Amino acid sequence: MQIHEYQSDAMRTAKDLPRLTAMLHVVSLLADEVGELSSAIKKAEVYGQPHDFGNIEEEIGDILWACAYAANVFGMSLETCARKNVEKLARRYPDGYTDRHASMRLDKQVSDEVSA
């Protein structure tokens, strides 16, 4: 499945809301779903329960749905958001992740110089 197909298919199940309500909904939805993923990890790492990988996979899927919904609410393509993110990460970490590059934030330096 291509990411643009996912966004289109996923949005079949989005409630039709006024834009401001949809923006508030997507922000709280993302927070809720990330919290549910966090809770699944906490149960294993803090309380010693076995990892419930089925639940973890479901929560990641819910987060993906919420990201598609966010892109849709703001009139964006999830595919474009993903591509731009990968391009930003390539600028920030030209040779892969390092703590040094993380602190330098090379992608922000280029943006700041262009806007100055």
Image: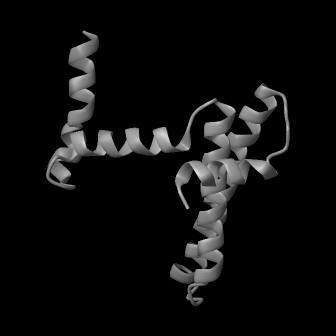
Position in image of residue 63 (x %, y %): 62, 57
Q: How is the image coloured?
A: one colour
Q: What is the residue that sits farthest to the top in this orientation?
A: 116
> Which of the two residues, 24 or 65, is positioned nearer the viewer here?
65
Residue drawn at the location 62% of the way across and 64% of the way down: 61
Q: Is residue 86 above or below residue 97?
A: above
Residue 41 lies in what quarter of the image? bottom right
Q: Is residue 65 above or below residue 58?
A: above
> Which of the two residues, 10 or 45, is positioned nearer the viewer here?
10
* 84 sits to left or right of 98: right
Position in image of residue 54 (x %, y %): 63, 81
Residue 113 lies in what quarter of the image? top left
* 2 sits to left or right of 73: left
Residue drawn at the location 22% of the way across and 39% of the way down: 91
Which image quadrant: the N terminus?
bottom right
Residue drawn at the location 67% of the way across and 58% of the way down: 33
Which image quadrant: the C terminus?
top left
Position in image of residue 69 (x %, y %): 68, 44
Give the number of callouts. 0
Residue drawn at the location 59% of the way across and 73% of the way down: 57
Residue 59 lies in what quarter of the image? bottom right
